[in-house]
Amino acid sequence: MGADMTTRTPFRAAAWLAFALLLWMALAFTPQAKAETPGWVQARSQHDVATTLQRLQQAVTAADLQVFAHINHSAAAAKAGLQLRPTELLIFGNPKAGTLLMQCSQTTGIDLPLKMLVWQDAQGHTWIGYTDPQAIARRHDADNCPIVPKMSALMHKLMEQSAG
């Protein structure tokens, strides 16, 4: 019985090692259904795209923010002969707040003004999302900029008002 145990133990260890290696390879090389995007915030809306966008525009106006542009990506796709589920972008902001952020790091100007995307997924659900100003600040080494928490809180509030 002693010889039997000594021959099985290395075999067991090798079998476990092979199993662990195969498991690691399967997990490491399996594509994920949806990867988390750092700094991306989204919520499912209770409304369709048009209503969610209208609610967003109203919330932006009520917050004394300026709408700089509205881009209807699906309409642009249709003009190009392509199909795209409803997808609309609202670009807005407050020049004072944006300037305060750019004073902390001018390169944040590439990510300003702030924007929110409203879209319909393949299942017909409407979503609203944005890049968190905290992530924008991190990307541009402006983590400690005093205006960032206020901007982040405002974006969250606008999203909630639009989706609810």
Image: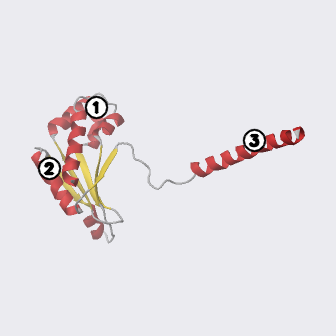
Sooner in the amino-acid sequence: mark 3 or mark 2:
3
**Camera-side residue of 57 and 102:** 57
Give amino acid for label 2.
Ala
Mark 3 and mark 2: span between their CA atoms? 62 Å
Look at mark 1 in the image and give the residue it sits on: 105
Left or right placement of residue 3 versus residue 27 in this view = right
Q: Residue at point 66% right, 50% down?
A: 22
Q: Which mark is residue 13?
A: 3
Residue 157 is situated, as x and y percent measured from the top left of the image, at 20, 44
Q: Position of residue 13 (x, y in %)?
A: 75, 41
Q: Secondary structure at mark 2?
A: helix
Is residue 159 visible to us here?
Answer: yes
Return the x and y of residue 159 as percentages of the image width and height. Answer: 23, 49
- Asked whether 35 or 89 is in front, the reply is 35
Quadrant occupied by the N terminus: top right
Which disc number belongs to residue 59? Answer: 2
Q: Are marks 3 and 2 in contact (CB under 8 Å)?
A: no
Front one among 22 and 94: 22
- Frontmost of labels 3 and 1 is 3
Q: Residues within 10 Å of mark 2 (few under 14, many from 20)?
A: some
Check disc 3 and give the amino acid type.
Answer: Ala
Mark 1 vs 2, N-terminal side? 2
What's the residue at 34%, 31% (across, down)?
A: 141
Residue in the image at 58% along x and 51% along y = 29
Disc on res. 95? none
> In the displayed image of the protein, which residue is found farthest to the bottom?
81
User: Which one is nearer the viewer's eye here, 109 or 67?
Assistant: 67
The residues tagged by marks 3 and 1 sit, at their Cα atoms, a distance apart of 55 Å
